[in-house]
Image: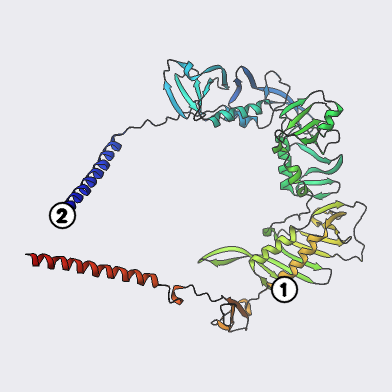
Amino acid sequence: MKNLKTIIIIVLALAVAVAAYFIIDDIISKTRVENPKITEVITPANIKSDDIKRYTFCISGEQTTVELMEVKVKDEEGEEKTEMQYRLVNEPERELNQNISTALVQAASLISVDVIEESPKNLAKYGIDYNSYFEVTLKDGTNYKVYFGDVIDVTYNVYAMREGVDKVYTISDTSFGMLTIYREYLLSEVIFPGSANSLTSFSLYKKGELEFTLEPEEHIKWKLVEPLSAKTYSQTAQEMVDKTYEMVIGEYVNVLPTEADYRNYDLLKPAYSIKVTADNKTVTLHIGRQSIEDRSYYAKFDNSDEVFLVPTKYLGWIDTELLEILYPFPYEPLIKNIKSMQYVFGTGEVYNLEIREREYLMDEKLVENYEYTINGDIVELQYGADLYNYTFYTTVIVDYDLQWKGPSETQKPYFLIEIDYVSGNTEKLAYYIRDNKTMYYIRYNPQFDMMSQYTGTIVDSGPIEDSMHKFLALYTDYLYVLCKDGKEHDFGDWIIVKEATEEEQGLKEKVCKVCGYKIAAPISVIKHTDPGSYKGANTWIYVTLGVLAAAGVVVYLLVRRHKKKKAEEQ
């Protein structure tokens, strides 16, 4: 009995100690004062790209300064005019990257991570270096200068201080790193003349042979003019041109290269060459192999000897998007632009496809989608989308045969697609047998009177044949029809056609009461894992309850025995 009392006392003491701890901690937490980080805009706020007149960036005494200057340029007609541009103060004749305005706005703005000390007495401990700074002069005469200090070991944040403001800040390592990137914009040398908007011709050569030439076109934005006249995939073409005009020289690696050097850089017979004409200037850039160090490309201009590096990010399209420039897309390939299509196979089958928007009830809400009808029968939506992909995304150009002038009057296409657009335009895509592996591909668009569009283009026959076979399988295997008068079927209850067993699936079907149309569905194989169908599923529950009941009886008997014994002793 004495031991029992001791245990009870210990438990109560522990409970009181735990409660006291939580009460004291709550009181402390309510009175605890933390020193929050103070974020401030170090530089003037809301600076715009046209506010900056002069910008200087200097690290360890290495200074770069750009200034807004009046320079002479030529317009699209070749007439000379003056305009304001940012130029390097020590090289005012050098054209800078067209994105420099955006870079300057970012580089002229700085936000602190924290205010470390106000009215500092010892700047030396922060490593404030008066030879590392950036300085900005705005058009309204405002001038400010921010100095940089040491890098903090743990956070990699950088100490900073604005001239005339008696505070030491920290800025993030990301902000400081971005400032050095913006400096690259200040130093970056423009490779091609003009801009993407003033470009008049863009050509790509592979091993000295012309791959294609693009020119801007009023109606379709970009068109192929060589080796054939045709529309191209304008989105990819635009992205390619934009990337080209973002291109800058990374660094010069050899200003007096020898023939052996050119051979080492793969510039003796360059893999690719880009030729651009804009603002009545033509520049050809030769591209060699990638460097081992950072995968940048070695490059040189056609009319100079110096070899320099061009970052990979500007040339990724050469390998990944080149084929899309030569991709035979229809003029208006979006589903919403298409009204109907007619498929004609060389074997004689003709399928008329109509596409229209309609509303569907989904989760008690009306949603819009497309309905595909082939020869009057509605194809399920998911297969309609597949049909669209089979039609437009299977043609792969492999070569050109410019000697081929088109099919004879009696020659029938292996596969023909005629497209009617919502706009009223029509377009025909035709494939003609060339050999066992390839086909000729032509396209005719009456709107632009392109009678010979893509004539002589050789495409891989495999995807076309595969597309045709998938189309036929799609039509025969997945077609379903509506009930009479275009109404939905009135199905009865499911009828078991075949019972499921433990080894095989069963089959059930239901029939439309109006037209007799049937739909079927499988019945899953029987598996005895359901608690409702497995007699032993609750065994452990019953065992547990039994043990608990037995324990209760034992406790009851022990207590009763103890009371009886105590009563006898009295």
State which quadrant residue 328 falls in. Answer: bottom right
Across and down, in percent, residue 171 comes to 50, 28
Residue sitting nearer the eye, 214 or 6: 6
As shown in the figure, which amino acid type bears the numbered disc 2? Met
Q: Are marks 1 and 2 in contact (CB under 8 Å)?
A: no
Q: Where does the image place residue 439, in percent across and percent down from the top left?
A: 85, 59
**Does residue 188 appear left or right of residue 7 in this picture?**
right
- Return the residue at label 1: 476
Q: Which residue is mark 2?
A: 1
Q: Is residue 333 left or right of residue 533?
A: right
The percent position of residue 95, horizontal first and vertical second, equals 72, 26
Above or below for 82 versus 475: above
> Seen in the image, is 324 located left or right of residue 11?
right
Give me the residue at 78% from left, 32% from top.
299
Badge 1 crowding class, 10 Å Cα cut-off, few under 14, some 14 to 19, many 20 or more, is few
Q: Depth check: 224 or 308 in front?
A: 308
**In the rendered image, the vertical position of residue 323 relative to residue 45, given as above or below:** below
User: Disc 1 marks which amino acid?
Assistant: Thr
**Residue depicted at 11% across the width and 64% down the height:** 566
